[in-house]
Each structure stands twice: as structure tokens, then as C-alpha cells.
Amino acid sequence: MKKLRIKQTKSGIGYPARQKRTLIALGLKRMHQTVELDATPQIIGMVKKIGHLLTVEEI
């Protein structure tokens, strides 16, 4: 299965609570933190919803 390297590049401050909760659900708690997750349909959907806050690359 493909993996994604997801990095938070923009703060969640000033965005709706739902988007902040999505950041936490992805495992991102602070700026410039990077996580590696499997590219499941659920993860891809979350990334698309808050893509403006993230940098994503395939591994």
C-alpha cells in the first residue's frame, strides 16, 4: 500500500473547529510536524479537506 508523508505547513488558528479536529485526527499537533500514513480512502479524504494547511508527498 502507498504511504503519504504529510507535513503541517500552516496553522489551524482562524479556521473552523472541524478543520482543527481533522488535523488532530491525522496526528498533527504542531506546525512543521510530519507524519507518515497509509494512503487509505479515509486519509486521502481528510487530506483533500484541509489540503490548504498541508504539504503532501507520496513515498
Image (cartoon, rainbow, N blue to C red):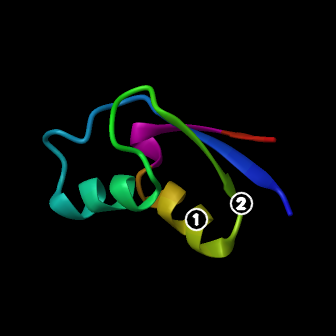
Q: Position of residue 11 (x, y in %)?
A: 27, 33
Above or below — where is 23 with respect to 9?
Answer: below
Q: Pointer 2: residues within 10 angstroms few (<14), some, or many (20+)?
A: some
Q: Pointer 1: residues within 10 angstroms few (<14), some, or many (20+)?
A: some
Label 2 sits on residue: 38
Please tell me whether residue 8 belongs to the stretch shown in magenta.
Answer: no
Work out which quarter of the rendered image holds the N terminus and state it: bottom right
Q: The residue tagged with tag 1: helix, strand or loop? A: helix
Q: Amino acid at mark 2?
A: Asp
Magenta stretch, residue numbers: 51-56
Give the foreground label among 1 and 2: 2
Q: Position of residue 32 (x, y in %)?
A: 44, 26
Horizontal placement of 57 versus 26: left or right? right
The residue sitting at 41% across, 41% down in the picture is 52
Label 1 sits on residue: 43
Q: Nearer the viewer, residue 32 or 56?
A: 32
Q: Earlier in the sequence, mark 1 or mark 2?
A: 2
Q: Amino acid at mark 1?
A: Ile
Distance between the Cα atoms at labels 1 and 2? Answer: 8 Å
Horizontal placement of 51 versus 36: left or right? left
Above or below — where is 25 with respect to 57?
Answer: below
